[in-house]
Amino acid sequence: MQTRAVVFRSDDLTLEAQIIIPEQPRAALLLCHGIPGGGPPDPTDEGYEGFARAMAASSFAAMWFNLRGCRGAPGEFSVSGWRTDIDGALDAMAKTPGVGELPRVIVGSSAGGAAGIDVAADRDDVAMIATLAAPATLATVGDDEQALLQRLRNIGVIHDPNFPPDPTEWWADLVGGAAENAIGRISPRPILLIHGDADQIVPYPHAETLFDRAGEPKELVRIPGGAHQLRRDPRALDALIDWLDRRLARRGAGHSGQVTPQM
């Protein structure tokens, strides 16, 4: 198993990624984080490196990076900006020796999953997509335009007091880029939606909306009592790995429908 640094451009930004490559990887996963919580870091949380290592242990190459505005990455948060970042990361992954020829899979958490859906809808080189706690739209998670902007400033993903130059245009980009508007264009490529039914940040009905609007083949895994940060829930990881195993063993195989793991 080896870890490599990957540097790529997104608009006028330089972003830095890491990729873990196991022996004989079966697919290349792009792990896309959500909007940070803004609180102090949890010393027990291994973050996306830990997530990547868990995937690599099951023979998946896994790449992760900080999207613009997050955790020291340059730039300011916008939905279209995050889509551009994910596009750039996929292009960089395709050029990475040892993984470029593998099936590419987006695995996105929360807002990163929503942006990933929008990207996958327009890129045929994305073989499949899985999301964890993805919102159908960010416009209905409890904030209006000004409140959401202020919350993002408080979290630290918008730093420039003059950004966005046009808040109305920024909000229209956020609403127009909703995952619920794009997910129907991903079919016939496989889609997995994993969501906790105790998620207080992105409530479970968001997953049902996405599932209803997605084409086949699609699966929705409901995690009983599951909270928002599903990458730390072993049941969610087991569901993700099981889905990848089934889909990669026989591309296009597997069942569609809704699944509830046992407690």
Image: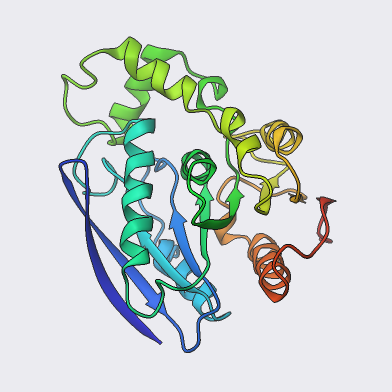
Q: Identify whether 46 is placed above or below 197.
A: below
Q: Position of residue 79 (x, y in %)?
A: 39, 32
Image quadrant containing the C terminus: bottom right
Can you tell which quarter of the image residue 64 is in? bottom left
Residue name at image x 33 percent, y 30 percent: 78
Q: Nearer the viewer, residue 197 or 44?
A: 197
Q: Nearer the viewer, residue 257 or 73?
A: 257
Colouring scheme applied when the structure was drawn: rainbow
Q: Position of residue 1 (x, y in %)?
A: 41, 87
Q: Identify whether 247 is placed above or below 212.
A: below
Is residue 66 visible from the viewing direction of this image?
A: no
Q: Is residue 213 left or right of residue 255?
A: left
Q: Is residue 250 left or right of residue 19?
A: right
Q: Is residue 75 left or right of residue 131?
A: left
Q: Identify whether 155 is placed above or below 19.
A: above
Q: Position of residue 13 (x, y in %)?
A: 17, 45
